[in-house]
Image (cartoon, rainbow, N blue to C red):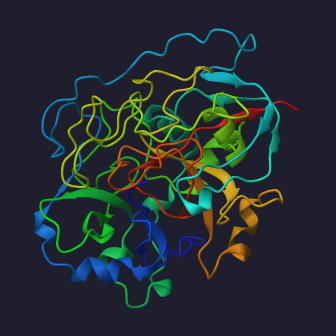
């Protein structure tokens, strides 16, 4: 992951705490030390920023130009179980040896037995999430008015509903610092992923983003499904293979960043910004976009490595957190992953994410377990 937008404190019944951001020693942004809003208001040159395009083809990341492909048809799934639930593919069970060798938090762990399950072939789209909202009246975390009593000393912008948005800096000030390309934007949410003035009209086939964990869980419950565990997600991304071949090269059939991050995305993979779901070839199980496009929530609490004990439920994440911020595991990387900033476009890559933090490069998909 090129950046991990850092911590916010968990919104409890509408409460919100300042967003935190830091760069890890490995050069990827890690959740932690520097106060987001303090860095934001102190960095000069905010006028030299431009939103990244969403779902656009070509070499520009300035948001100019037309969307050439607003939807991509999924090919039929061959093999697997008959009569799949709509939009899902079967993932047979097996034993997963989790992890990889690029970053410390990926160090391989004890093999995990994974039972077979159904998984969404793509990330949940704007259209799908809109149907859920229309049916339930659900209001996402990013759309809720924060509790000002929990934000003493925060700037006015942080007292408004919003989300964290990736922006392209026109120039960098000093060494690479994620604070130069991530901004808390009032009014940003799943309907307006880049903030006011952006929209999802005509972009129904793009993955829904700017959703916090509880938003993804609410959708999954409504659909009669769950979010995947980290083991389920990695097993599916490995095509249900016990020992997947190491894939440390930038993938060709995935939406990632080509060029000098964060200044220039050549879009040689076909898209600058988020792509419609299913535009890249699926894996052997018929699953698309597990790698790249947008990061995806799992239902496991974050731990800094693969430990022998089963991963804790997310309800326990707050107790496990080093401090007041609870984090979960996200997987898959995004359109922002590049060789010169991070290499998290791999099945074994993993990243912590604050449970209540909505960002413009994070979505989800669901699973249906067979009892």
Q: Kindly indicate the quadrant of the structure image that contains residue 77.
A: top right
Along the viewing direction, whichever of 356 and 239 lies nearer the viewer: 239
Residue 88 appears anywhere in the view: yes
In the foreground, 142 or 78: 78
**Residue 320 screen position, x and y as percent:** 72, 74
Image quadrant for the N terminus? bottom left
Residue found at x 74% / y 64%: 315
- Is 85 situated left or right of 65 in this image? right
Q: Residue at x 57, y 53 (%)?
A: 350
Q: Nearer the viewer, residue 12 or 249?
A: 249
Which quadrant is the C terminus positioned in?
top right
Q: Residue furthest bottom?
A: 153
Q: How many marks?
A: 0
Farthest residue, direction right: 371
Choose between 80 and 338: the one closer to the eye. Answer: 338
Residue 63 at x, y = what percent? Answer: 17, 43
Q: Position of residue 216 (x, y in %)?
A: 58, 48
Q: Is residue 290 left or right of 45 when viewed as pictured?
A: right
Q: Quadrant of residue 112?
A: top right
Residue 331 on image: x %, y % = 56, 48
For image coordinates 71% across by 45% down, the residue present is 231
């Amino acid at each position: 992951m090129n950046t991990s937008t850092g911590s916010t404190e968990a919104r409890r019944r509408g409460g919100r705490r300042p967003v935190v951001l830091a760069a890890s020693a490995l050069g990827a942004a890690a959740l932690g030390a520097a106060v987001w809003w303090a860095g934001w208001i102190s960095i000069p040159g905010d006028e030299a920023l431009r939103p990244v395009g969403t779902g656009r083809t070509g070499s520009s990341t300035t948001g100019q130009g037309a969307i050439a492909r607003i939807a991509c048809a999924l090919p039929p799934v061959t093999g697997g179980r008959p009569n799949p639930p709509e939009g899902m593919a079967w993932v047979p069970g097996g034993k997963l040896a989790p992890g990889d060798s690029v970053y410390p938090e990926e160090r391989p762990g004890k093999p995990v037995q994974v039972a077979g399950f159904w998984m969404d072939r793509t990330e949940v789209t704007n259209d799908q999430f809109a149907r859920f909202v229309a049916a339930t009246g659900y209001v996402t975390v990013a759309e809720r008015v924060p509790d000002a009593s929990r934000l003493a000393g925060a700037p006015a912008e942080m007292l408004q509903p919003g989300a964290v948005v990736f922006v392209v800096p026109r120039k960098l000030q000093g060494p690479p610092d994620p604070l130069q390309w991530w901004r808390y934007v009032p009014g940003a949410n799943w309907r307006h992923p880049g903030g006011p003035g952006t929209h999802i009209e005509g972009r129904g086939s793009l993955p829904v983003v700017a959703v916090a964990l509880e938003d993804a869980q609410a959708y999954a419950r409504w659909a009669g499904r769950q979010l995947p565990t980290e083991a389920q997600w990695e097993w599916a991304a490995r095509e249900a293979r016990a020992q997947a071949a190491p894939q440390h090269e930038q993938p060709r059939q995935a939406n990632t960043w080509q060029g000098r991050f964060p200044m220039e995305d050549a879009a040689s993979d076909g898209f600058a910004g988020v792509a419609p779901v299913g535009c890249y070839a699926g894996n052997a199980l018929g699953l698309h976009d597990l790698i790249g496009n947008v990061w995806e929530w799992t239902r496991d609490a974050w731990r800094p490595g693969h430990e022998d004990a089963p991963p804790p439920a997310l309800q326990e994440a707050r107790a496990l957190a080093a401090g007041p911020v609870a984090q979960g595991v996200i997987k898959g990387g995004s359109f922002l992953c590049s060789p010169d900033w991070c290499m998290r476009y791999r099945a074994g890559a993993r990243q912590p994410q604050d449970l209540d933090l909505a960002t413009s490069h994070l979505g989800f998909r669901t699973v249906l377990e067979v009892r």
